Amino acid sequence: MRYKSFTLTIYGLLFIFTMFGCSQRHYPLGGTKHTSAAWHKATMKSYTVLGKCYHPTYVSLRQVQHGISSWYGPNFHGKYTSNGEVYNMYAHTAAHKTWPMDTMVKVTNKQNGKSTIVRINDRGPFVKGRIIDCSYAAGKALGLDKMGIAKVTLKVVGFSGKLYTPKKNRAKDTTKDRKTRIALSNFGLQLSSFYEYKAAQVSKAKYEKVYAQHKPIIKKLVDVNGIILYRVWLMGFCSEYEAREFKNKNALMGAFIVRN
């Protein structure tokens, strides 16, 4: 069972929590049949629990995470979850500290090979090393009712409460589908900054050749003193996680994550 000093209604107080110690981030998320647009926006803001700051982020299809899973049941049954739902211990749902609400996740127990699919509708578990907290039903399907906790692999298999189904003709995608893909690719890395626009152009051209799979852009910034700074960003990452992995893989130690 997971440790919770805070109740499942933690996000009812999220707007207060985010005033202390965490930078606020806003994401253009729409509502689903499970989570309203307002709750989506709230649950994607940075928050602090037990002195640690968490930064919710988008995820990409088939993104994988490894760690320990726990489960929670009777003590929380009937109480509110982070997205405003009433927790049902018999539904296949789960809590994750940073992934968006209604993300569909395949959880595989590495210790017995069992797997199940859950929908994220809560935040947690706030215990070191644990990456997901499954509902009683999901935990039972994984064998956690007997094991308590287990090493697991998480894999993103859908969004907005729906499993991903490849479209035969991407040209027929709806406007909503296109907007979703755009929203999921607006993370980037700031690679350099200059006082002169021409210098920024040279830098941008260099990165276009080196990192052809992504899109370098120039962002103009005017500070409070009227000083202009031209920043070179490398855009097109589907999540903060992906941008961080790219930074580490390419040894871009001076770069930092941004969002357009």
Image (cartoon, rainbow, N blue to C red):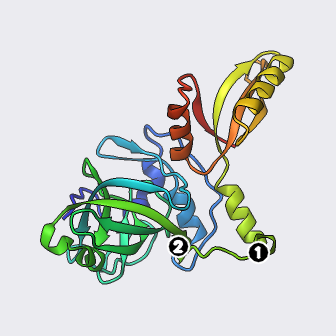
What amino acid type is highlighted by mark number 1?
Asn
Residue 60 in percent (x, y) is at: 56, 57
Q: Residue at x 73, y 70 (%)?
A: 176
Q: Return the disc, 1 or 2, that comes first in the chain's sequence.
A: 2
| Number of other residues with Cα within 10 Å of mark 2, as a class: few under 14, some 14 to 19, many 20 or more | many
What amino acid type is highlighted by mark number 2?
Thr
Residue 253 in percent (x, y) is at: 53, 24
Classify 39 as above or below 93.
above
Q: Which quadrant holds residue 254? A: top right
Q: Residue at x 24, y 56 (%)?
A: 5
Classify 168 as above or below 212.
below
Where's the N terminus, which quadrant?
bottom left
The residue mark sitting in front, 1 or 2, is 1
Q: Looking at the picture, tell me which residue is in the foreground, 54 or 256.
A: 256
Residue hosting label 2 = 35
Q: Are marks 1 and 2 in contact (CB under 8 Å)?
A: no
Give how far apart the Cα atoms at labels 1 and 2 are.
29 Å
| Number of other residues with Cα within 10 Å of mark 1, as a class: few under 14, some 14 to 19, many 20 or more | few
Classify 30 as above or below 55.
below
Q: Which quadrant holds residue 119? A: bottom left
Q: How many marks?
A: 2
Residue 213 in percent (x, y) is at: 70, 42
Secondary element under disc 2, as helix, strand or loop, is loop
